[in-house]
Image (cartoon, rainbow, N blue to C red):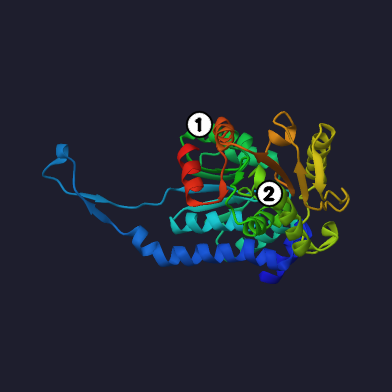
């Protein structure tokens, strides 16, 4: 179904076929390969030593299917993050209901067709629809719920699961920070930052959210990231076929509002911002001079907007990171001592 997958993601996101292959198709194939390689080992009955209170008996651990699983998939990687968890659920012997996102209708419809052709309906079923459908599903007594999305909805899912004592897997986003130390290889850091931040138009749960960069290399990093944007997307990134679209006009307006509010509050638009709500395109944005009280500093950006925040001393940066909610990822560019300090104190 590769041709149909590429067409669906092009329709929903404007995704380039190469990006679809790398971020949607290959990860699922890797999940399948991994499960097939290890499944016999995972299923194996294991003999274990009994506890002292059970002395004289024998003990075994016998893996069994969890039961019926619900997978609520997000819109940002609608194929990967629906089928990846499905591989694991099927490997564990579960029957599964998959609820794809209503914000990616072409991909959701394709998932329904693909899975309908492949599996019996009492083994895998796809339920399409919006928030009201997800709410009705959460009222049902599932044995396990797998949710990928934002923390606010994650709380709703966990509360619903508590009613039937269903176990949950929650993969939630957050403001994943980057620290660039004075010893960092600036060219390499800029390359990875530009790729990690701007592919999928920044709509990735582990995308770098903002960058703390040592003041001594801040100007060099800004220039290097701008150069990488040009290499990746050319002179008009908003029109580049390699640049994905923002998922919906509402999300585009939200991102535009974050940038406009920051600039009105004194931040500098150092790069990008071109684009239109009608096309849902937005050229990669670099912001400098943001402050803690700006909305862009408080909520997960989830788009192609990168604030660069200079620092002189590391400790205030670490204090700021640990004072906030736990992010999903944290990135460090620098020497080993910097990396170990950050890992020890965050």
Q: Quadrant of the N terminus?
A: bottom right
Please, is residue 314 above or below residue 113 in the view?
above
Quarter where residue 158 is shown? top right
Do callouts 2 and 1 mark residues in contact (Cβ within 8 Å)? no
In the displayed structure image, the side of residue 230 where residue 221 appears, left or right: left
Q: Residue at x 62, y 38 (%)?
A: 312
Give 224 or 164, whichever is nearer the viewer: 224
218 relative to 166, above or below: below
Q: Nearer the viewer, residue 296 or 251?
A: 296
Where's residue 198, x and y in %?
Answer: 71, 54
The outermost residue toward the front is 216
Is residue 280 rendered to the left or right of residue 327? right
- Residue behind mark 2: 101
Residue 305 visible to the viewer:
yes
Could you tell me which secondary element the residue under label 1 belongs to?
A: helix
Pointer 1 residue = 163
Between residue 46 and residue 253, name the one nearer to us.
253
User: Does 308 appear above or below 25?
Assistant: above
Q: Give the Cα separation between the discs numbered 2 and 1.
A: 24 Å
Residue at point 55%, 39% (across, down): 140
Horizontal side of 23 relative to 63 (left or right) equals: right
Q: Position of residue 308 (x, y in %)?
A: 70, 44
Q: Which one is in front, 330 or 122?
A: 330
Residue positioned 81% across, 31% down in the render: 265
- For the point 36% across and 58% down, the residue is 42
Q: Position of residue 68 (x, y in %)?
A: 49, 48
């Amino acid at each position: 179904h590769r041709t149909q997958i590429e067409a669906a993601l092009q329709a929903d996101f404007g995704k380039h076929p190469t990006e679809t292959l790398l971020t949607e198709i290959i990860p699922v194939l890797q999940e399948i390969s991994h499960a097939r390689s290890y499944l016999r080992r995972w299923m194996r009955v294991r003999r274990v030593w009994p506890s002292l209170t059970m002395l004289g008996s024998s003990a075994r651990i016998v893996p069994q299917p969890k039961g019926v699983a619900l997978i609520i998939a997000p819109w940002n990687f609608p194929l990967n993050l629906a089928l990846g968890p499905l591989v694991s659920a099927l490997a564990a012997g579960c029957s599964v209901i998959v609820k794809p996102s209503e914000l990616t209708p072409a991909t959701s419809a394709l998932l329904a067709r693909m899975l309908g052709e492949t599996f019996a309906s009492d083994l895998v079923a796809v339920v399409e629809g919006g928030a009201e459908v997800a709410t009705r599903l959460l009222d049902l007594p599932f044995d396990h719920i797998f949710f990928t999305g934002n923390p606010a909805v994650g709380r709703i899912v966990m509360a619903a699961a508590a009613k039937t004592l269903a176990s949950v897997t929650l993969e939630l986003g957050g403001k994943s920070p980057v620290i660039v130390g004075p010893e960092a290889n600036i060219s390499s850091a800029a390359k990875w930052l530009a790729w990690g931040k701007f592919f999928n138009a920044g709509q990735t749960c582990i995308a770098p959210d903002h960058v703390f960069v040592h003041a001594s290399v801040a100007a060099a990093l800004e220039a290097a990231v701008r150069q990488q944007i040009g290499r990746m997307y050319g002179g008009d990134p908003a029109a580049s076929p390699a640049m994905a679209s923002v998922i919906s006009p509402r999300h585009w307006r939200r991102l535009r509002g974050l940038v406009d509010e920051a600039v009105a509050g004194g931040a500098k638009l150092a790069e990008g911002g071109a684009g239109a709500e009608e096309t849902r395109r937005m050229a990669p944005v670099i912001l400098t001079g943001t402050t803690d009280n700006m909305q862009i500093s408080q909520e997960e950006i989830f788009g192609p907007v990168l604030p660069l925040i200079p620092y002189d001393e590391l400790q205030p940066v670490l204090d700021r990171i640990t004072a906030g909610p736990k992010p999903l990822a944290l990135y460090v560019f620098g020497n080993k001592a910097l990396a170990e300090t950050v890992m020890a104190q965050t």
